[in-house]
Image: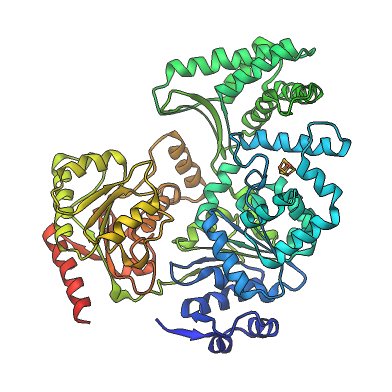
Amino acid sequence: MSEHKASKFLKGIPAVVKSSLSKKGTIPDNYVIRRGQLEFVEEASRAIKKKEVFLGSAPCGIGKSLASLLAVLPHLETNKLMICFRTRSQLHIYLKELKALAKNLSVLSFFNKKDMCPLYMNRNLSYFDFSEECKQLKDNCESSIKPYCKFYRNNIKGKREVEELALNCAQQILTPREAVRLMSKRGFCTYEAFKRVLPKVNIFLGTYHYVFDSKIRETILRNFGATLSRVLLIVDEAHNLPAFARELLSDKLTKNTIERAYKETEKFKHESQPFIRKCLEILMEQVFQNAQQALKSEELRRLHPQKVSDLILSQNGASALEAAEILLEYGEFIKEKKLELGSEQGLSYNYRVGTFMENFFGNNGRQYIHLVEKDQRSRIALEVRSLDGREITDHVLRQAKGSILMSGFLSPPKVYRDLTLYETNNVYLKELDSPFPPENRTILVASDVSSKFKQRTGLMLRKWRDYIEAISKTNKGNIAVFFTSYGLMHKVLPLIRTDRTIIVEKREMKRNDVIKQLTRSSFNMLSGVMGGKFSEGMDYPNNILTCMVAIGLPYATWDVYQESLINYLENQFPENGRKYAYLTPAILRLIQTCGRVHRSSDDQGCIIILDERVTHEGIKQLFPRYFQEEMIIVKNSIECAKQVKEFWTRLSIA
Ligand code: SF4
């Protein structure tokens, strides 16, 4: 791989980037810039200038976090930068890069508020309940009514000290955990202190909620002293964004919450109490109970909200939305009463039922589906789920001064463009190839096996067994075999005869223990599922994994939601519903699994996909370009083992 020292890099990048970075001394002298980074910086920077949304797929090894920072920092000036991510590991990567780069910038990073709260971070409380309590404890500080939050009270009393401390955290670019440790030792609330000094910092890092949840975003922007049009935005791990946005627009109510709400009515007398009790009884006895009897375990069924609304109207004389309003009012009343009685918990389950009913009966468009579910433990829940997250994402990505969406797996970028934006204009799509040497990998696809449900016969299980045994004998180093489901894994594993130590994924297993075992010996076979904890977001350092075998295409469980999502997207993007809703997420899971082998440019290893459907044109074209170009089709396990052997021989004589 060709790499450039920073000085060379500066010669190759656009003038706007170069001058600004040089002026600021942003890139340390010894910084090594990679080829893919250069391309990324150049094109993302140009997109920001032209006010285009930039969507970049950059495989592992490009150094995309640094590249995105180099693309936006020259445009920062008096603007603000918001970086949002899904997992904490990404936050730490950005903080590391910013520490090395940004000499004169101040940076604040946030986990969610509960995880930054010294009082509640370790308490088992739902986020909704926590928010209600925090709000009340803060309100009580103003009036000195007990119970109040002593940390927040100290923030009010020691304004100057807390501000200095928070700004100090920003200049040192501390992680949220480091900051909380420092500030709570001095008796302060980190979250509230950080919010207070936001106008004085340039860069904000936080989870997707901070950017895409409109209420939270508005609060943060107000504190930041900026409108969205002055914000440069980096959305990391953007392959998660469409599903995240859909989740944000969805809501769920369990029977447990209704039962708790009913208990509240026994304690808090109010003129609307008889109406509310009747309403809760209808939900418990006629909706939840019926579902308990009618549904099988793990079944998801459509529920027509109008039918439930009619039930409430006919038996209680008010529509479901009117009932929601009354529940919210009653919930407010309970919250006040609880605090008057000195309770530390100023929350109300009736209020929660009210908000759910507003969402469930109010969200009626074609982009919503209403469901009732019985889970594995026979618990019933009502749900309203969104089928389209664009009403959240489009606004944010278009209004921001510049938006960069990127991930190692935005493949193909066009799909993610369509799932996050309404229009295709003013969007720049970029797909970078893997920066790792192609000679360090071989990508094999078997043409005689398939995980298609109808083909999962005894013969198919034996064919998979033959492949795994043949690969196991031929490969140099540890292998991993990942399946589409635990069920399939437990059918195939007992058939396999191997001298390797088999490590089977279990819920209680720790990642570090697996790494230790794979480091101790190179004669292991790790087995798990695609989408599980060992196949996504886990690094296998120092080439301790040299072969990944993926058994089948990991489609999501087929249910009424999947079907509705396909139909809805088919309507939005004719001929593409199945591709957008069902195929792309499966390929994403598969690619993420395969990506575990090559984590650095020195890593060598085989990627073997045991499902012939990957060779079908319609599916193949959803893979990253280098996968499509390098795929070698093998007709059986013998041919597969031969290819694996030849690969290692080639490397040994190279
Ligand atoms: S004000 Fe801060 S310390 Fe107090 S409860 Fe809320 S988050 Fe926690």
Whether residue 439 sits left or right of residue 74 in the image: it is left
Can residue 47 be seen at all in this image of the molecule? Answer: no
Give x and y (percent) for residue 35. 47, 80
Whether residue 476 sits left or right of residue 139 in the image: it is left
Residue at figure coordinates x 34%, y 74% from the top left: 602
Q: How many marks?
A: 0
Q: How is the image coloured?
A: rainbow
Nearer to us in this view, 649 or 221: 649
Can residue 357 be seen at all in this image of the molecule? Answer: yes
Whether residue 367 sits left or right of residue 512 in the image: it is right
Whether residue 426 sits left or right of residue 500 in the image: it is right
Nearer to us in this view, 47 or 178: 178
Give x and y (percent) for residue 607. 28, 62
Residue at the far left: name it: 638
Q: Quadrant of the C terminus?
A: bottom left
Nearer to us in this view, 472 or 296: 472
Ligand 1 position by quadrant:
top right
Give x and y (percent) for residue 47. 61, 72
Q: Quadrant of the N terminus?
A: bottom left
Q: Is residue 377 above or below residue 92?
A: above
Quarter assignment of residue 226: bottom right
Residue at the far right: name it: 143
Quarter assignment of residue 601: bottom left
Residue at figure coordinates x 39%, y 54% from the top left: 512
Give x and y (percent) for residue 100. 60, 74
Residue at the far front: name it: 185
